Image (cartoon, rainbow, N blue to C red):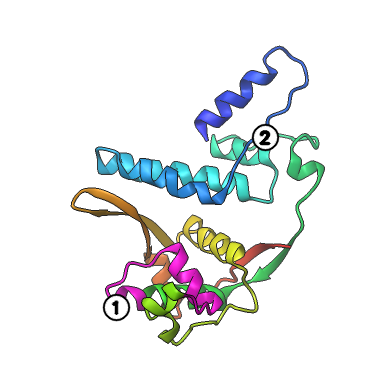
C-alpha cells in the first residue's frame, strides 16, 4: 500500500487532474506470496503478508478508496468528492449475514488439519462448492461431511474472496508453507477468534459484501 500510495501521488503533483489505473488479478497473489516466502527472516514474512492483505483489501473492497488509504495511514478526515471509482460508480454487491458459512469454512479447515492436510484456498473452496474434480477425489475432499455446503452460495471466485475476507477479519490466518526451507505455497490456519466461532462463543453478526 505504501508504494502504491507513493506512485499514485506523483501523478497529481503538478496540480492538474490525473488518473491512476491499477492492474490486479487475484491469481497473481500466489506470485507475491512466493516472494514473501523467500524473505530471510520470519518478521519480514509476517510484515510482507500483512502488506499483501492490506493491498488485497484495497483492491477488492467496495468502500471509498481515498478513505481506505487515509485510514490505513491513520487519517480519518478525508473527503473523496466522488473522485475514486467506487464512489463514482459503486460496485454492485449484496450484504449478507454469513455466520453459518464462516462456521462451515472453519470446520472444513479444522477437518483438513486433523487429517494432517494443510488447507489452502483451493482445497477449502473445493469442499465448500462440492467439487468432484480429480484433485478433490485424490485428496478425498468429497468425503468431508460438509462437502457441498456452500454450493448454492459460492462460485469459485466468490468462495476464494470469502476466504480472503475471513483472513482479513482474523478468523483465518494465511501462513507460509516451507518444506526444507523452500517455499511451496501458503496454507490456512484457524486463529483464536476463529476458535470462538467453532466453540459457539462468537455472538456478533458477521456481514459480508458478496459481489453480484
Image-quadrant location for residue 199: bottom left
Give left or right: position of 180 versus 21: left
Residue 97 point in image, percent of width and height = 64, 72
* Residue density around tag 1, few if under 14, some if 14–19, many if 20 or more, within 10 Å: few
Marks counted in the figure total 2
* Residue at image mark 2: 77
Q: Earlier in the sequence, mark 2 or mark 1?
A: 2
Residue 109 visible to an observer of this rendering: yes
Residue lying furthest left: 180
Residue 147 point in image, percent of width and height = 49, 82
Tell me the magenta residue range: 111-133
What distance separates the C-alpha of mark 2 from that of mark 1? 49 Å
Image-quadrant location for residue 210: bottom right
Q: Secondary structure at mark 1?
A: loop
* Residue at image mark 1: 115
Q: Is residue 117 magenta?
A: yes
* Label at residue 74: none
Q: Nearer the viewer, residue 123 or 104?
A: 123
Q: Is residue 173 magenta?
A: no
Instruction: Assign the C terminus to one quadrant of the image.
Output: bottom right
Residue 197 point in image, percent of width and height = 46, 74
Residue lying furthest front: 134
* Above or below for 12 versus 171: above
Give left or right: position of 53 versus 173: right
Of circles 2 and 1, which is in front?
Answer: 1
Residue 47 visible to an observer of this rendering: no
* Residue density around tag 2, few if under 14, some if 14–19, many if 20 or more, within 10 Å: few
Q: Secondary structure at mark 2?
A: loop
Amino acid at each position: 500500500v505504501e508504494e502504491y500510495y507513493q506512485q499514485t501521488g506523483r501523478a497529481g503533483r503538478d496540480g492538474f487532474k490525473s488518473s491512476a489505473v491499477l492492474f490486479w488479478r487475484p491469481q497473481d497473489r500466489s506470485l507475491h506470496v512466493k516472494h514473501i516466502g523467500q524473505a530471510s527472516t520470519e518478521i519480514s514474512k509476517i510484515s510482507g503478508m500483512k502488506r499483501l492483505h492490506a493491498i488485497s483489501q484495497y483492491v477488492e473492497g467496495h468502500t471509498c478508496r481515498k478513505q481506505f488509504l487515509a485510514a490505513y495511514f491513520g487519517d480519518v478526515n478525508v473527503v473523496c468528492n466522488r473522485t475514486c471509482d467506487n464512489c463514482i460508480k459503486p460496485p454492485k454487491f449484496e450484504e449478507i449475514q454469513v455466520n453459518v458459512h464462516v462456521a462451515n469454512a472453519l470446520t472444513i479447515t479444522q477437518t483438513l488439519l486433523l487429517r494432517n492436510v494443510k488447507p489452502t484456498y483451493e482445497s477449502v473452496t473445493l469442499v465448500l462448492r462440492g467439487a468432484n474434480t480429480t484433485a478433490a477425489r485424490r485428496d478425498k475432499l468429497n468425503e468431508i461431511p460438509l462437502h457441498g455446503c456452500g454450493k448454492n452460495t459460492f462460485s469459485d471466485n466468490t468462495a476464494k474472496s470469502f476466504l480472503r475476507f475471513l483472513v482479513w477479519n482474523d478468523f483465518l490466518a494465511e501462513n507460509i508453507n516451507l518444506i526444507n526451507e523452500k517455499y511451496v505455497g501458503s496454507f490456512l490456519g484457524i486463529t483464536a477468534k476463529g476458535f470462538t466461532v467453532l466453540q459457539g462463543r462468537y455472538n456478533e453478526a458477521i456481514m459480508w459484501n458478496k459481489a453480484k
